[in-house]
Image: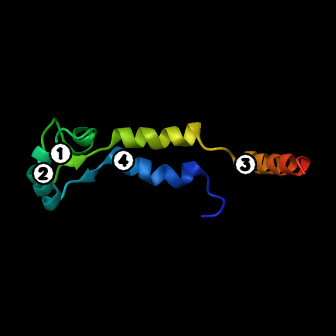
Amino acid sequence: MAGACLADLLAPAIAQAKEGTIVTRSQADVTSEKLPELKDAPGFADVFLIDDKPPAAGARVRQIALAATLDHLIHAGRPSCSMREDCSTRRRQLRASRR
């Protein structure tokens, strides 16, 4: 995806996180089975439980915090290519001046 911007790359993941995924039978079973071990793990309940309970098969689990984090990356972003190029050029200039 040469030339694709970060927003284009992350848009499907953001949409999926907002829309959620359907819980499979195996996910429902494993979440219920492992709940005693995982319920106190930081972030587990927010991501994998619905109203502090394991979701039933067929329920929709949304990851709103993940969507918000990805959206933040788009807007807070990483340095642009031109900024990185400018920094690389400046580093080379500084190294050359030390010789």
From the image, tell me which residue sits under label 4.
17
Query: Could you tell me residue 89's position as x and y percent?
Result: 82, 50
- Packing grade of label 2 (10 A; few <14, some 14-19, many >=20) is few
- Residue shown at 74%/45% (left/top)? 83
From the image, tell me which residue sits under label 2.
34
Query: Could you tell me residue 73's position as x and y percent?
Result: 53, 42
Q: Which mark is residue 84?
A: 3
Marks 3 and 4, the one that precedes in the sequence: 4
- Residue shown at 15%/51% (left/top)? 31
Judge left or right: residue 8 versus residue 91.
Answer: left
Judge left or right: residue 85 versus residue 33.
Answer: right
Q: Are marks 3 and 4 in contact (CB under 8 Å)?
A: no
Q: Are marks 3 and 2 in contact (CB under 8 Å)?
A: no
The CA distance from mark 2 to mark 4 is 23 Å
Q: Are marks 3 and 1 in contact (CB under 8 Å)?
A: no
Query: Could you tell me residue 55's position as x and y percent?
Result: 15, 47
- Residue shown at 36%/47% (left/top)? 17
The amino acid sitting under disc 3 is Arg
> Foreground mark, 1 or 4?
1
Marks 2 and 4, the one that precedes in the sequence: 4
The amino acid sitting under disc 4 is Ala
